[in-house]
Amino acid sequence: MILSMTGYGTGSAQKDGACVSVEIKTVNHRFLDLHLRISREYQSLEGEIQQLVRGALDRGRVDISVTVQNAAEDALEINSILLKGYLAAVGKLREEFNFQDSLDLKTVLSLPGILQAKDSVQTESSAVLSELLRESVKEALHGVLRMRSQEGEALRADMQRNLAGIEENANSIQVISASSVPEQLKKLRERLDQLLAQQGGIDPQRLAQEAALLADKCDISEELARLKSHIEQYYLLMDSKEKAGKKLDFLLQELQREANTILSKSGNLEISRLAIAIKTDIEKLREQVQNVE
């Protein structure tokens, strides 16, 4: 199954004057890399958010932005103990450094922790926010997965075209390789004649070694067989239900290895040209796979 790592989704839910909005953006990354933005007073919800995201996504950089609005008028109260601490600290600063300014109401209300949920509604509020959060995150993830699926289909079509090009060139190499056997045999005979013409003759054991080395250097049948096997596995992975990004990346390394070996062994210019074309398509596939989950 081909899923892109590029995705975007939003979700929101509201109840009893509270509203939670979630925005999720994802891009490609080797592993699952979560980045969460949420107000400090709601950081206790962070673990629940991460659990939901990890249950839906396996790879990619994920940026999550959570906005919480709790409009219940009777849900807040002044933290008197904390306020007294602030005022004591302000008095000490004024006395020690001779500051003249005093705190106004706007400044007091902006101090961290001054406004807090009443004990009577805190538990109920937390339960409501947790419920709204789950709904919003799930809705946003649904949008992300839908976009990843759509992008994945486009990636799959592009990869199929490049894979078909590799397969076509591999078949051409096989045909050329089979038809060039007489030419390879001619080169082998010429090499043997050179060795036999050396003064004092040649050791039969060395002669056998030279013949074996030259024959092995010219033979690319095993590399072609493995190349075609990797291509077949690539097609199967694209059609399977499992997330295939990491396995496809590994297969591309193996495809590259076989293409390099064919290029190094071949003494035929046309085979070399086709091998280079295969390597070019492999590089295109590698770029595409970088965005596959």
Image (spheres, rainbow, N blue to C red):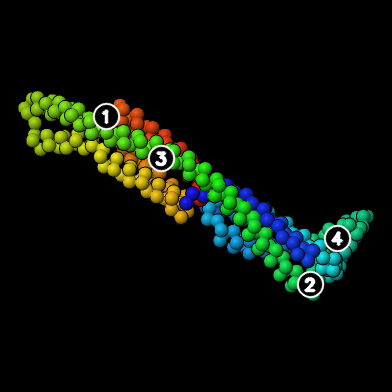
Establish if 218 lies above or below 150. Answer: above
In this view of the protein, which residue sits in the foreground, 95 or 18?
18
Residue 47 lies in what quarter of the image?
bottom right
Secondary structure, mark 1, is loop
Give neighbour class at mark 2: few <14, some 14-19, many 20+ (Cα, 10 Å): few
User: With 153 as the anchor, is 220 left or right in this view?
Assistant: left
Query: What's the CA distance linking mark 2 and mark 4?
Result: 20 Å
- Choose mark 1 or mark 3, whichever is in front: 3
Residue identifier under label 2 = 121
Cβ atoms under marks 3 and 4 closer than 8 Å: no
Residue identifier under label 3 = 163
Residue 121 lies in what quarter of the image?
bottom right
- Choose mark 2 or mark 4, whichever is in front: 2
Residue identifier under label 4 = 109
Establish if 241 lies above or below 252. Answer: below
> Label 3 is placed on what type of residue?
Leu
Query: What's the CA distance linking mark 1 and mark 4?
Result: 81 Å
User: With 101 as the anchor, is 250 left or right in this view?
Assistant: left
Residue 46 in sight here? no
Which badge, 1 or 4, comes first in the chain's sequence? 4
* Residue 172 coordinates in the image, percent (x, y): 31, 33
